[in-house]
Image (spheres, rainbow, N blue to C red):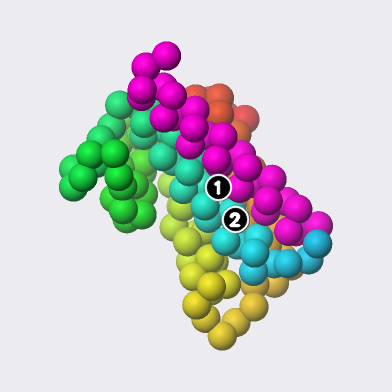
Amino acid sequence: MSTMIADAQLFLTKAQEALAGAESELANRRYNNVANRCYYASLHAARAAVEAAGLRSASQPGTWSHEALQAAFVGQLIQRRKRFPSELRATLATNQILRNTADYERHWVTEVQARRAVRRTQIFVAAISIGGEQP
């Protein structure tokens, strides 16, 4: 197995684990934790997708800033190469905004926001898992 494929599988597994954590947190009504886990699930899934596509970070090999990863996923894999549906374009940014609210703001994530985040993240991770085809 090539390193690129192994890395993609590693990050997809991390995404699935984080999503399972978000689902568990939702069941236990810990909505701020849901936001955090959803963001990292989508971030790891995006990393899996860019690794599988052979994209590399321009700044440091093997590492991606959150912003650079989001830009590569949306710019290269959605807009340019059309590997993933355009409906996934806002998932990372939306999940990051919600995570920032949960982690840094004086506001609570609501149950409705948490449920939406889980559903959005389930769709995102599923799309990455099957290589971009509509789940």
Disc 2 packing (10 Å; few <14; some 14–19; many ≥20): many
Q: Is residue 109 left or right of residue 55?
A: right
Percent of width and height locating residue 133: 53, 25
Q: Amino acid at mark 1?
A: Ala
Q: Which residues are magenta?
A: 1-27
User: Which secondary structure, mark 2?
Assistant: helix
Residue 64, numbered circle: none
Q: CA distance from mark 1 to mark 2?
A: 6 Å
**Residue 79 covered by magenta stretch:** no
User: Can the viewer see residue 119 in this picture?
Assistant: no
Q: Looking at the picture, tell me which residue is in the foreground, 4 or 114.
A: 4
Q: In the drawing, what numbered circle is on residue 41?
A: 1
**Vertical relation: 66 (above or below) 52:** below
Residue 73 relative to residue 97: left or right: left
Q: For residue 72, which quarter of the picture?
A: top left
Q: Quadrant of the C terminus?
A: top right
Image quadrant holding the N terminus, namely top left
Mark on residue 37? Answer: 2
Q: Position of residue 109 (x, y in %)?
A: 65, 72
Magenta region, mostly helix, strand or loop? helix
**57 to the left or right of 49:** left
Within 10 Å of disc 1 (Cα), the crowding (few <14, some 14-19, many 20+) is: many
* Rendered residue at 73%/51% (across/down): 23
- Provide residue 100's location: percent of width, then percent of height: 49, 70
Number of numbered discs visible in the structure rendering: 2
**Outermost top residue:** 1
Q: Nearer the viewer, residue 90 or 46?
A: 46
Residue 53 position (above or below residue 74): above
Residue type at mark 2 is Arg
Q: Secondary structure at mark 1?
A: helix
| Residue located at (41% from left, 22% from top) | 5
